[in-house]
Amino acid sequence: MAIIDSQPPAATRGKKIDIQELSLVYDGGEEAVQALSGVSLSVEEGSFTCIVGPSGCGKTTLLRTIAGLESPDAGRILVNSEPITEPGLDRGMVFQEYALFPWRTVRGNIRFGLERPDCGCADCESRVDELVDLVGLDGFEDHYPKALSGGMKQRVGIARAIAPDPEILLMDEPFGSVDARTRDRLHAELLDIWAATDQTIVFVTHDIDEAVRLADKIVVMEADPGRVQSTRTVSLPRPRNRTDTAFVEVVADIRAELGEPVETR
Amino acid sequence: MSHQTESSRKNRSKIWYAADLRRYSRGIGGLAAFFAVWWVGALLTQPSYLLPTPGESAQAFVELFATSTAVSAPFLGPGLVLPTGFAHLVETLYHYVPGLLLGAVCGIGLGLTMGWSGRLDDWLQPLIRLLRPIPPLAWIVFAIVWFGIHHTGAAFIVFIGAFWINFYGAYGGVEGVDSELTDAASTLGVDRDLSMLKLVALPSAAPQILTGFRTSIGRCWMIVVGAELFGAPGVGYEIINASNNLAMATSVAYMLLISLAFLCMDVGFRLLERRALAWR
């Protein structure tokens, strides 16, 4: 796959996701945890947004709420100006621990979202073939997840999520469990897929390098209670190189904001 | 390089072969020791009919298949004549198989629904706590007064035994479904409980369900023999019938027949299980 370095015209498009004063409390037995407190955020159509922050800042909760897997206690989320109440095929999700169906082969996993009656794809088999090809899993179609490496599992996870052609792709630390070299390759592939599909991506990570590598916009969150600390636009040209001065500066800037020690490499 | 791999593979298979050989020879040794103790014990026991020797038992086993008996079972017609051992085995299977299958279907069905629906679980949990500890054979009195101690009564007892084991297999399996998988399915358009049950809970619980069923195959053999000791026709009845005539060698032969029937079913089901769960 060739790496496409053209910049999608993200900023010129409309609001895809509009998060308004979102609050969510986890009732954790003894004491309730304020996972999100008054989070407001908008995501432009076709853009790549990364959410970073320390553990416990509610970034995963925010993503799950956009997916419709959590219900907020206050505030709301609009997608295409419609409020979210439950999960839907317009929002695909990629999970940190893959969450592949172990009893289904690679093909079977990718096809899962295409088997719903409301999917309406004309030719599901060729769609699956296309996706297997897109994520580079040719030859592994009939393998069960147990036989795949972490990187391959997440390729399946991505293909499965984008199979029903969602408008929004939600990714929860998707590359947190793969080794650094594989992660690098997956970043490039993900950007290719993004360019090819024109989806709006919201990507949660604790890895600031990863966020700067991928994002148009980076949202920094802080913990106790989980809220948005800052948002910034990253306008470095793609493909981005970790060793470029401008790249390093953005990373150092975010690290400083989070109060993390700045690495000198 | 390829030569090296070849030789290391050969080496490994040689090591495996040696380990297998050692294991099998130990197993055969254990069996031989058992038969030796049995044989000596039988020779020393007086009066000798209290414990038949392995040889006498083997002879009785052969005789089970040298003589013929008409099977008195419904649907087969009156005239079906089989070797005696098979005839009584067929009688047993006449209540074993329906009891096992019906018990498994009902147990798995209720286990899945209860494991899935918290409300039903709230309703039924105390009742199940109350009924579960009752050994299936205790229901024999109701089997007798409701159905009579024939095929239906024995099937009823087997049903109860199969029901609980399969119920807990399915219930535990569904409770253990990874919430990440149901989340993933939700984001992929599964929005009804029934679809979630079919597409995620059932396949995810399949290993426990199949283990439950395999356990019930064995447990139901114990139960069926218990029910037959009360008079339902079949191999269990023949065990006690033979011993009433002090033909202990024949009793042993029927015991061996039960063991072999169970072994065949167990091995067969394990093969099916391995194939169905190839994804694990």
Image (cartoon, coloured by chain):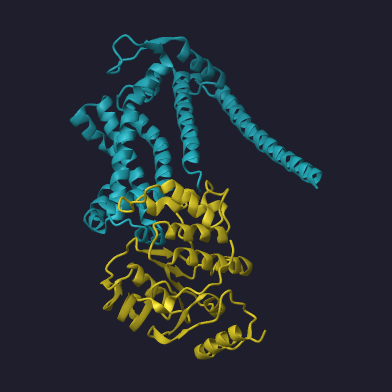
Chain colours: A yellow, B cyan
Residue at position x 45%, y 18% in the image: B250
Residue at position x 60%, y 69% in the image: A184
Relative placement, left or right, of A230 versus A87 is: right
Relative placement, left or right, of B101 versus B19 is: left
Residue A203 at x, y = what percent?
Answer: 46, 72
Is residue B128 visible in the rendered image? The answer is: yes
Residue A13 at x, y = what percent?
Answer: 38, 76
Residue at position x 37%, y 70% in the image: A64
Residue B241 at x, y = what percent?
Answer: 36, 20
Residue B15 location, quadrant: top right
Q: How many discs mark residues in the rendered view?
A: 0
Residue A237 location, quadrant: bottom right
Relative placement, left or right, of B26 versus A237 is: right
Task: Single out the residue that lies furthest toward the left.
Answer: B146
Residue at position x 43%, y 44% in the image: B211
The one of A180 and A125 positioned closer to us in this rendering = A125
Relative placement, left or right, of B90 versus B52 is: left
Identify whether A5 is placed above or below A103. below
Identify whether B244 is placed above or below A263. above
The one of B206 and A150 positioned closer to us in this rendering = A150
Residue A210 location, quadrant: bottom right
Residue A212 at x, y = what percent?
Answer: 54, 79
Is residue B245 visible in the rendered image? The answer is: no
